[in-house]
Image (cartoon, grey):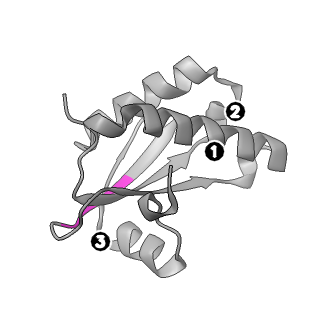
Amino acid sequence: MRKSYRVKKEAEFQTVFTQGQSCANRQFVVYMLEKPDQKHFRVGISVGKKIGNAVARNWVKRRIRQSLTELKPQLKQDCDFLVIARPTVAYMSMAEVKEHLKHVLKLAKVLGE
């Protein structure tokens, strides 16, 4: 996923946290903020230290990014959203990560049908 599709700055993360709507399941928390003037969606990924060491955290981030790349055509284009991984994600396969991420994105109304 290109850099233009990512929320990178701390101020942007905080804006989505404070002004956005949140939705969660046991594996992920998603914060979503609609931005009607935006051309395409942007995503921020947060994986805390409870997940494990740096290798485990990067592994989880790669799985999330890959899942989002596969779901890209179905994602709502005029919003910023943050995906926060919970510790149980570290023990899941790629298929499970994608399935649970898809579920929470539907709950957050970021993913179209």
Q: Are marks 2 and 3 in contact (CB under 8 Å)?
A: no
Q: In the picture provided, is 29 more to the left or to the right than 94?
A: left
Dividing the picture into quarters, in which one does residue 25 lie? top left
The residue under label 3 is 19
- Mark 1 residue type: Lys
Q: CA distance from mark 1 to mark 2?
A: 10 Å
Estimate the x, y position of residue 39 in percent, counting from the top left.
24, 62
Q: CA distance from mark 3 to mark 1?
A: 24 Å
The residue under label 1 is 61
| Tag nearer the camera, 1 or 2 | 1
Q: Residues within 10 Å of mark 2 (few under 14, many from 20)?
A: some
- Of residues 50 and 16, the one drawn nearer to the viewer in this rendering: 16
- Mark 3 residue type: Gln
Estimate the x, y position of residue 22 in percent, counting from the top left.
33, 53
- Of residues 55 and 70, the one drawn nearer to the viewer in this rendering: 70
- Mark 2 residue type: Ala
Does the segment drawn in magenta span residue 57?
A: no
Which residue is at a point 37% across and 75% down the rendered structure image? 15
Estimate the x, y position of residue 30 in percent, counting from the top left.
40, 49
Q: Is residue 26 visible?
A: no
Which residue is at a point 37% across and 68% down the rendered structure image? 16
- Which badge, 3 or 1, is on the more N-terminal residue? 3
**Magenta-tinted stretch:** 31-35
Which residue is at a point 73% across and 46% down the rendered structure image? 57
Q: Is residue 62 visible?
A: yes
